[in-house]
Amino acid sequence: MVGIEKLRRPGGQAVQLLAVTACYYAAARLGLLRQLAVEGAVVTPVWPPTGVAVAALLLLGLRCWPGITLGAFFSVLTLSTPGPDVLGILFGNTAAPLCAALLLRRAGFRTDLSRLRDGLALVFLGALGAMLISATVGVGVLALAGSVPLHSFWPVWLAWWVGDAMGVLLVTPLLLLLHGARGPLPLRRWKEATALAVAACVLVPLATHSPLSLLFLVYPLIIWAALRFQLVGSVLCALLTSVAATVAATDGVGAFAGLSRIEVMVKLQAFNGGVALTALLLSAVIIEQRHTRNSVEKACQELVEVLEHLTAGEAPPPRPHTGAEAADDADDRPWPSGAP
């Protein structure tokens, strides 16, 4: 709480905004390393800054939105000389994450992603729904300025929208999990984690770069990671897979060899979307089932204790108010304390 109170002060808020700006810009530089030309427009298959922006708004509150705008502005400077259309692009890149955060807040989203409804909300509200704003505003402004021909509007729009949505699906869960990390894995789990990492480093490049189109090989890895390591393992595997597939697609090798730019974009985005959705939703289902099992086991244990007291002719002990129940009571107020 001391750290949060310090960040609420003017100096702390300035540092917070600078940190968001720097992270957004660094993520943009990473995203620009791999690009695709679609109908004469250069797009990124995965746009990580959008994921950074949504995570920052969820964790730090809505006050950090100027950092997102500044980061987007510096990112635009690396691409071209800003013109009148830059204002529309900045508006879209800021409004979409803000809309995502507000929609998730309204849906009772928990940043620990411990329920299936949290995963579904992040997918359909935070990624697919809210990112319609940035794609529509950004491509619309470019079309009005003459940078994008009208006949190319929809292909460019689709690439923009999917790139932003993939940034949310791949980057936001990872940042939320890192923020809520409790500690390192137990020593006995490191052997399995190492085996999973080795298998991923071998199979993912093989699946994405092989001319035999072996992309399906990554799904057993995603399932293994989700079953044994939940979101941390599955999201990391999905991110590695997406990066490797993007490299193969932009190089035109492996399963993406001999395809037109439109076909490469469609195949890559469908694959990346399938991997991200599998990792996120499967992990959320597993975590929710484990929480349900733990709750049932605890209820059974409490019932046994009550029966023992009744059999002995004693009054049953008072039932404590558990942390899980307190979390359920707080579903309607899941916003971090730094939010306005």
Image: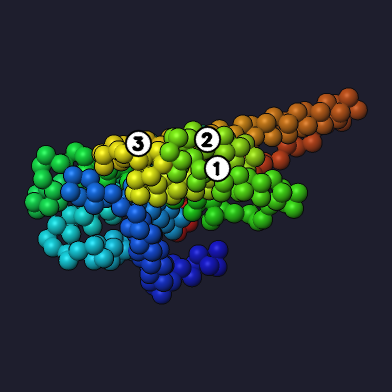
Whole-percent x, y for residue 132 in the image: 27, 41
Residue 296 seen: yes
Give the residue displayed 38% in from the left and 59% down from the top. Answer: 30
Numbered mark located on residue 267 in the image: 3
Compared across the picture, whether 218 is left or right of 167 comes to right
Q: How many marks?
A: 3
Whole-percent x, y for residue 231 in the image: 56, 43
* Residue that mark 2 sits on: 217
Are the residues flagged by discs 1 and 2 in contact, CB closer than 8 Å? yes
Badge 1 local density, few (<14 within 10 Å), some, or many (20+)? some
Are the residues flagged by discs 3 and 1 in contact, CB closer than 8 Å? no
Give the residue displayed 23% in from the left and 57% down from the top. Answer: 90
What secondary structure is marked by label 2? Answer: helix
Q: Which amino acid does label 2 sit on?
A: Leu
State which quadrant residue 11 falls in: bottom left
How much space separates mark 3 and mark 1, taking CA atoms? 19 Å
What secondary structure is marked by label 1? Answer: helix
Badge 2 local density, few (<14 within 10 Å), some, or many (20+)? some
Q: What residue type is labelled 3?
A: Lys
